[in-house]
Image (cartoon, rainbow, N blue to C red):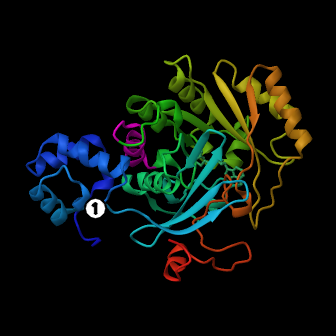
Amino acid sequence: MASDKPVNLLDLDRKAMEDYFTSLGAKPFHGRNVLKWIHKHGVTDFGQMTDLSKKLRASLHAQAQVRLPEIVLEQPSLDGTVKWVMELADGQRIETVYIPDGHRSTVCVSSQVGCALDCSFCSTARQGFNRNLSVGEIIGQVWHVTRRMGKPPTNVVLMGMGEPLANFAPVVRAMDLMQDDLAYMLSKYRVTISTSGIVPNLYRLREVSDVSLAVSLHAPDNELRNELVPINRKYPLETLIPACRAFVRNDKRRKVTWEYVMLDGVNDSLGHARALIRLLEGTPSKMNLIPFNPFPGTDYRTSPPERIEAFRQKLMKAGIMAILRKTRGDDIDAACGQLVGKVQDRSGRTMVSLRQRQLQGLST
Ligand code: SAH
């Protein structure tokens, strides 16, 4: 499909789609139909959108396209996790991960190419920041996974590459599409945005969206957090914690999910656990302890299992629900903090891309 058409329909949420069809001289419901064709039925060819008039299809052909990211690599993990590398129109690459777990299936979506926040234990940070993703590039990841798996995921987490709250408007629109009945129909409890804590945007988000909140905490005090999550220097804990509390205040079912990466000898003592308990007093909380996932060039190591368990027990005794997040997909570098948009395996060999396999007739 030519890429010079002005409008990418994948960038449009319901309201934008209705407005676009009105501007074409059609009715808003035509826009809703097209939204459904694209996201619910996976149809991107206007010729197959049989409830549109010939004339309307012709104007769409002339002015619009459905431009999806292109899957260049599909890597299945031994544990059922699948990682895709997707290439964008300008050649940039992002990663998307699918994590099946019983009846649940979670898609971990990227929001930026690279990341500017420079957390010391994250490999995406090493890549630096390239650019924000558009709405279409974010929702396009969910589109692809839905098609490849034959049904929509039960959960989406914005925990892939990038800081979602640093790409505010496109992320909010994409999350609206995830929840739209004409698209992926996920409840607000099943769409989770993960942030390292861009405090003003947390307040903004609360005004326009009602999704679930996960926050990358990783340390119980400013001194340590400044080192691990440098954005803390700008938005320290005394500003972050009240913003998170405000986010969940109006819904009794809500808790803030805190992410806490377990780094050997850095943030994993019982003293750290005690400080955490004090910090979170009065905030409805759930703690996700994440074993550190190593990557080449890092000096950090993951905490030993018994220390993680002691840490977890300490939190549980204080009434904080704490779970150890299973490491998934680490054999394909798909685990938290390992996403870098590369197409090389660990030995530096370039993997055979899907496109190449298709060309060779090995895959359809
Ligand atoms: N920028 C957002 C989204 C990334 S989410 C955020 O910071 O929340 C990915 C989660 O994995 C974050 O909690 C991040 O801190 C964590 N993470 C990053 N690198 C990791 C690593 N090497 N091992 C385990 N978790 C890591």
Which residue carries the number 1 mark? 45
Q: How many marks?
A: 1
Residue at 24 percent across and 45 percent down: it is: 33
| Residue 226 coordinates in the image, percent (x, y) | 68, 45
Determine whether 316 is above or below 261 in the image: above
Determine whether 4 is above or below 21 in the image: below
Nearest to the observer: residue 167 or residue 304: 304
| Residue 254 coordinates in the image, percent (x, y) | 56, 23
Left or right placement of residue 31 versus residue 288 in this view: left
Q: In terms of image quadrants, where is residue 309?
A: top right
Q: Residue furthest bottom?
A: 360
Residue at 89 percent across and 33 percent down: it is: 310
Q: Which residues are magenta?
A: 167-182
| Residue 159 coordinates in the image, percent (x, y) | 58, 48
Q: Secondary structure at mark 1?
A: loop
Q: In terms of image quadrants, where is residue 224?
A: top right
Left or right placement of residue 66 versus residue 175 in this view: left
Does residue 351 appear in the picture of this structure? yes
Nearest to the observer: residue 63 or residue 79: 79
Q: In terms of image quadrants, where is residue 42?
A: bottom left
Q: Amino acid at mark 1?
A: Asp
Whether the magenta-drawn stretch holds residue 173 is answered as yes
Chief SS of the magenta region: helix
| Residue 249 coordinates in the image, percent (x, y) | 52, 19
